[in-house]
Image (cartoon, rainbow, N blue to C red):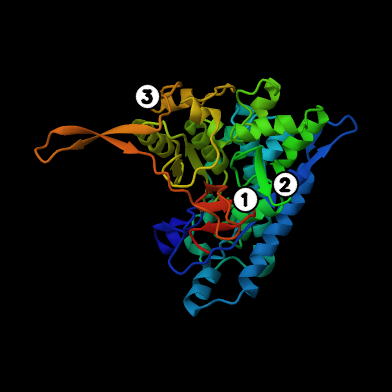
Amino acid sequence: MKKGLGLIRSTNPCSEEPLYPYESCNLGSINLYVFVKYDEDGNAWFDWEEFHETIEKAYEFLDNVIDVNKYPIKKIEETTKSLRRVGLGIMGLADTLAALNIPYHSEEGFKFTRKITEHLTYYSLRKSVERARTRGKYPFYEKSSYKEGMLPVAGYYKREYWTLDWDKLVDEIKRYGVRNVGVTTIAPTGSISMLVDVSSGVEPIFALVYEKRVTVGVFFYTDLEFERQLKNRGLYREDILKKIADNGGSLQGIDDIPEDLKKIFPVAYDIPWWDHIRMQHEAGLWITESISKTINMPNWVSIEDVEKAYLFSYRLGVKGITIYRDGSKTAQVLVTPSQKRGRYFMTVDNKTLEILESLGIEKPSLQGVENMLTQVSMAMTSKGQPRETTVKKDKEVLTCPDCGSEMLIYSEDCLKCLECGWTACVVA
């Protein structure tokens, strides 16, 4: 809160946690995919009650960590305990949406995500109030805006988005206080999501299938939810998996795949950059801290597209974004049809472009440009005149230091090996 220790001017390295000097990062993530249940007819539904119970238990765990943790220096301990900031987040969103047959970047997908983060923050804050009554408010509470009934979540000020009784919760906050200055954050979850085989954070699935070569043969790694749905339809065959792997892990442009599966299983580069930003915005409306998410862009996007992405994010009120343009790093292992053909496959109707235009930003081209191995740039000569130069794509390929594989991807400020799971992030 602004009134406590002044303005927050920086974040942790992955940008999801705004912190004061000497504050520590105390994060945890809930796997949404485990709350997908099935009725007798095989229809999927989301267990909201179990989700609520898990939120409260996970929040209590993070709050306890503050007290039992051993701090490297006294200043970090003092600052951490004066604010008691925790960051409960999620992972497995994309798999959950697919299981519920909801396209990731559809209006229904945005609405479901918004509801998930609303419930995440509501039940975390409710438990924080309960702990404030029994264990005390965080020391800087009296200097915060909480006691005036103000909450650090944009969704609270958009009553039309409410699905829970926020008036009641705010009354309890003003009466009893809260235990923590902030309670929710969506971190990258790069390593932990790989451990439990689900999509990371609020990201879309990066690749549905990829080929894995080992000494005993060739195998296909398949997203668990996608594998389940293929088996239900009798489509789980090696020839189909091979086509998807050769297609960069994307379903777009493959005739053997039903159209409804193509809609509910987009991969990162199938999704237009403006819908990546829209998803981060919708999820962030109910998060007290911030979100780490990659705005994936194919290599054929223009400088104007990048400029529009930043403007769109700023005017929506997104706290901060990470843009990754394909080809800007040396490692490149997966190429989807959207990248190869220089255009997006617009298979899902939504209102994102209408919102973009309503904010005074010109609509980007839906067709993009042809993807070429070389690109032409204009440089200035010593006399100030432009001259044409050809910039070739870097052919250097990075390899995994553990297994030697070239199957490396960049996601959420981390370099990951799809073969063995090795990862290297901004911080170790």
On the image, numbered disc 2 is attached to which residue? 217
Question: Secondary structure under badge 2?
Answer: strand
Q: Quadrant of residue 6?
A: bottom left
Q: Nearer the viewer, residue 330 or 259?
A: 330
Circle 3: residue type: Glu
The residue that appears at 45% across and 44% down in the rendered structure is: 321
Q: Is residue 320 above or below residue 262?
A: below
- In the image, residue 134 sits, relative to residue 289, either above or below, namely below
Say whether residue 23 is left or right of residue 257.
left
Element under label 1? helix
Q: Residue at x 49, y 52 (%)?
A: 398
Q: Is residue 8 visible?
A: no
Q: Which residue is mark 3?
A: 362
Alpha carbon distance from label 1 to label 3: 43 Å
Q: Earlier in the sequence, mark 2 or mark 1?
A: 1
At horizontal 50% and vertical 62% (from top left) the residue drawn is 427
Amino acid type at mark 1: Asp
Q: Which residue in the protein does label 1 denote?
A: 171
Neighbours of disc 1 within 10 Å: few (<14), some (14-19), many (20+): some
The secondary element bearing badge 3 is classed as loop
Q: CA distance from mark 2 to mark 1?
A: 62 Å
Question: How far apart are labels 2 and 3 at the CA level?
Answer: 50 Å
